[in-house]
Amino acid sequence: MTLKEVFKQRFEELEEQASQLESSKKVLRTEIIGTGEFIDRYLLLSWKVKVRNLLSKVCGEDSQHFKQFEREEENRYYPTYEIFKAFKAVFLAAKEDFEGGYLSSIKTLVQAEVFDSELEQANELFSSGYYTAAAVIAGVVLETALRELCDRSGIPHGKLDKMNSELAKAGVYNKLNQKRITAIADIRNSAAHGKQDEFTVQDVSDMIKDVSRFLADYLVD
């Protein structure tokens, strides 16, 4: 799964959740607002947090999409249906621009295309039964990503384990991600040395997916 596919899937998931939110709509009466259409407050909060996170990664916090979403959050204390529709409008605008290829800075776009190309190659090799080669390529993508994160954080390049440790220590990502990266690196090393008995086909499949998610979480500005 490439970076674009990861984000596309997330947009689709959140659009489906928006439909579920709409189905929670009820007509209620309150002392302050009076009679109106309301939706589940906690479902709305959960959806807003996830959408805000997605917009920050895909559009960037300086984008009009993200800024408008923040503006809609100001003084929005009551979960009315009209308020939800405003949030949804911003979300759908971002989704449309993403699908049309109108988002991301040039640097981010070039970087994402390079990673996507490599991961597509890994996926194609995996689909053709070349699991060892797929694991090696996915591992190279991960190591390249760690080098980029080190550059952003002012951490010197080194061996993968060293960079992984330093990035976790610097708070770039948590210990759970550090452990998963270590596991991915172990699969890559076994594949690179032809030790196919040390990993399974499912390990390689999960590895490629995990690298894609990692890129989506930490390499997109």
Image: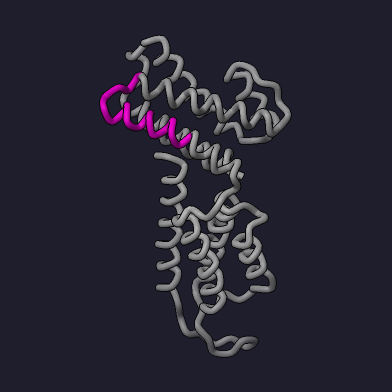
Outermost residue on the right side: it is 154
Answer with left or right where residue 125 lies relative to residue 113: left
**At 41% across and 32% down in the image, what residue appears?**
208
**At 58% across and 38% down in the image, what residue appears?**
219
On whether residue 130 falls in the magenta region, the answer is yes
On whether residue 84 falls in the magenta region, the answer is no
* 31, above or below 210, in the image: below
Answer with left or right where residue 42 lies relative to residue 24: right
**At 45% across and 77% down in the image, what residue appears?**
25
Magenta segment, principal secondary structure?
A: helix
- Tell me if I can see residue 183 in this picture: no
Number of numbered tags placed on the structure image: 0
**At 65% across and 35% down in the image, what residue appears?**
172
Indicate the position of residue 91 as horizontal and vertical percent values.
Answer: 52, 64
Indicate the position of residue 13 as horizontal and vertical percent values.
Answer: 42, 56
For the residue pair 177 and 211, the one nearer the viewer reads as: 211
Answer with left or right where residue 154 lies relative to residue 41: right
For the residue pair 68 and 25, the one nearer the viewer reads as: 68
* 141, above or below 82, in the image: above
* 137, above or below 113, in the image: above
What segment is highlighted magenta in the picture? 115-132
User: Where's the C terminus, which quadrant?
Assistant: top right
* 59, above or below 146, in the image: below
Q: Quadrant of residue 162?
A: top right
Q: Quadrant of residue 16?
A: bottom left
Outermost residue on the left side: it is 128
Indicate the position of residue 174 as horizontal and vertical percent values.
Answer: 61, 35
- Tell me if I can see residue 92 in this picture: yes
